[in-house]
Image (cartoon, grey):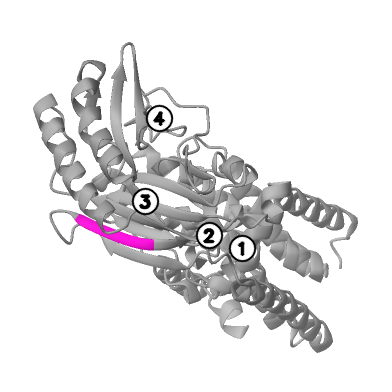
Amino acid sequence: MVFVHKRPILAATFTVLTTTALLLVGNGMNPVWPVMWIAFIPVLVLAAETTSWRIAAAAAALSIFLSSFTMLYYLYFVLGAPLRAWLIPFSIASLLFAAGVLLFRVLLHRGAVFSAVIALPAFWSVVEYLASFAPTNGTAGSLAYTQEHFLPILQVASLTGPWGISFLLLLFPTAIATALYLHRRSLPHATLITGSTFAILAAAIIFGAIRLATPTSKQTIKVGLLDTDTVVFAQQPTEMQALAQSYADHAESLARQGATIIVMPEKTGLLLSSNTQTIDPILQSVANRTGATLILGVLHVVAPDSFNEARIYTPNQPITTYDKQHMLPPFESDLKPGTALTLLSNSPAPIGVAICKDMDFIYPALDYGRAGIDLLLDPAWDFNIDRAWHGHIAIMRGVEGGYAIAHAAKSGFLTVTDDRGRILGETRTNTAPFASLLVDVPLHHDRTLFDRYGAWFPRLAALLLLAAVIRLWSTPRSA
């Protein structure tokens, strides 16, 4: 483009501002999913057209870095995390994205068109997969979570996990930028690139539409969710007893309305071992009287260890527990993580329990899917500002594993979704002294490809990336 060649700095500035603005809208705390499909086009068009690799790299890195300022506010000002918790990961992400854009640029300029289109999506899919092992975030930084309201594309997660969706989100803008670059040089190549990309996207959407239209089980279970945001954390034994009694009273009301399972948030308060004989009978008696199973999250201190624990009160059965496996550092770094799955006893179908940040990670959710559960109960604690972003991450796990999710978050949402990611019911938890939700949840397990083969797609992406790099080495600069 003439403007890029004549005024490169001005073009780069415009590109950075445009891409940053689009990313803030499409990938923010309340992501607007259509925007993400076009967000990277400006920076990729600049990379294709500019004669300076330095301008291309700087524009790509700055776009990612500047768009992360919402996370700076969230991590530093809301959560109180140290500044490095934002600066280090997003600086690395910015540099990695710039490297991916440069790989796209050099392949395109050497005439390796199809390798150029595939290289950046494959590279970023591998980056997201490797980032999923980070103990602080897991998969939470994936671009895929921006598409949770685009239900046909969301179904791709049942095949590939989140990485296939991220691949498509970068494949589309890369193909568009490539086509714009080629249309003056080789119209047939440009047409082939766009046609092939649209065919892949159409296939993904058609698959999703068919999966959404497939009937599921008519067997249902009535699940109640319950939360109060008026007590953030009950610290003293008397305060914890009063809160447990309040939860028990409201849980009994939901049970009288037909709830078979009632889920309450994580870490409602501090439970010392010496106080279990006071707290447990309050909730167990409700379970025994009503026949409903109650799940309450507590911080349980069993000296010398402390656990982020979900206590499960089954009618006329011993109390069972689930210990959270993935902690939120640094706030939970002193807690002992759990290692085992927990399934409800005496339930009409296999039903599992996880806690909040566990849902940011592929495991234990994938293990529950392989165990064949129909429903996963998720006591949680969000932070108001992230209710629509972090609170909905659990939806992806249900689509991947083929089961419904009941997510009860303090300072967030009470949300129930089916195994296709459709929201069956949702309410904010700060709408009343006690917010509640009662939903008939289909009992159904869909054995997915992701269930069976796990993270196969990042390995395929790594092979595609390797092929692109080999193509780069084998293509002379003069091309």
Q: Residue furthest top?
A: 304
Type of amino acid at the residue the image marks with label 3: Thr
Type of amino acid at the residue the image marks with label 4: Thr
Q: Position of residue 335 (x, y in %)?
A: 37, 24
Residue 436: in magenta span:
yes
Q: Quadrant of the N terminus?
A: bottom right
Name which residue lies at 78% across and 86% down: 191
Q: Earlier in the sequence, mark 2 or mark 4?
A: 2
Q: Find residue 231 and report its image quarter.
A: top left
Q: Which residue is mark 4?
A: 321
Element type at mark 3: loop
Element type at mark 2: helix
Q: Nearer the viewer, mark 4 or mark 3?
A: 3
Q: Which residue is mark 2?
A: 143
Q: Earlier in the sequence, mark 4 or mark 3?
A: 3
Q: Nearer the viewer, mark 2 or mark 4?
A: 4
Magenta segment, which residues? 435-439
Is 201 left or right of 419, judged from the image as shown? right
Type of amino acid at the residue the image marks with label 1: Ile
- Evaluate if marks 2 and 1 touch, with contact meaning CB atoms under 8 Å apart: yes
- Evaluate if marks 2 and 3 touch, with contact meaning CB atoms under 8 Å apart: no
